[in-house]
Image (cartoon, helix red, strand yellow):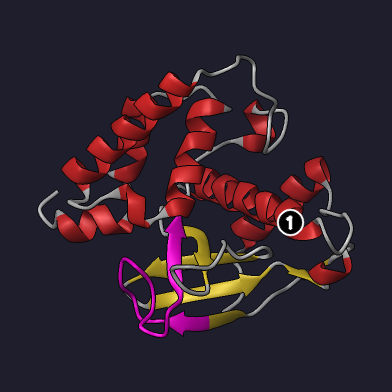
Amino acid sequence: MKLTDSVKATRDRYVAKFGIPSGTPETIDDIARKWSVGLAEQIRFDTGVSTYGVKRADPGRPICKDCLARNDASGLIMWDMLTGTGTGHPDLVKDPDSLPIGPGTPDGGSDGQVFVPVASVDHIGSQPGPTPPPSTVYTLDQYFKARDELEKIYQEELFRSVACDPDAIVNWMFHVREEGHDSAWVRARVKESPEWHQKHPNG
């Protein structure tokens, strides 16, 4: 399956503003991963489709550094958005084909692939970039308070602990810490996730 024209248009606007990630072979993974998460957030914002996100190869692995994922009733699929990332200077895959990587379940495929939902964020229109600098210094107590609030949201909305999903903790802490979102915003985004809808079939 090819990307839709609207998704391609978002990708091209994102690339026009932020370029293609580059670095050294030692640093590129984190740089590309941040770029890919930002792109997925922008695609979700522009399309309004909550099933777009990213993925991990298994629950213990980092988020994919160069792909876009989608998880719905038809299954978990991914597109390679960059090629040659390991060199430090990847190229854009202009017209990628999707790759099926698992059945359509909230947590991804039975082969270990795990879908990671992202927030809906307008990086192009309202943010200076996927990683704006912090405007304030947080205390340790504030970090613990944010963690406790996130745990409360996961227990109340998803009936599980966020502690088993370290990438989710990093994702939400980024949006709280760097972008200034509050717990109400986080809860609203969690309630948009496929996992929430699977656990709350009656809404």
In the displayed structure image, the side of residue 130 where residue 190 appears, left or right: left
Q: Is residue 183 magenta?
A: no
Report helix, strand or loop for mark 1.
helix
Q: Position of residue 187 (x, y in %)?
A: 30, 35
The total number of labels drawn is 1
- Residue 98 seen in the current view: yes
Residue of label 1? 32
Q: Residue at left 69%, top 65%?
A: 66
Q: Quarter-wise, where is residue 29 in the image? A: bottom right
Residue 119, percent from left and from top: 47, 43
Magenta stretch in the rendered image: 100-117
Q: Quadrant of residue 141?
A: top left
Q: Nearer the viewer, residue 92 or 132?
A: 132
Outermost residue to the front? 140
Residue at image location 67% in from the left, 38% down from the top: 130
Examine the rendered structure and indicate whether residue 86 appears above or below residue 12.
below
User: 172 above or below 86?
Assistant: above
**Residue at x-position 79% and y-position 43%:** 18
- Amino acid of disc 1: Ala
Few, some or many C-alpha atoms within 10 Å of disc 1 (few <14, some 14-19, many ≥20)? many
Taking the spot 44% from the left edge, 45% from the top edge, the residue there is 169
Residue 101 location, x and y as percent?
48, 82
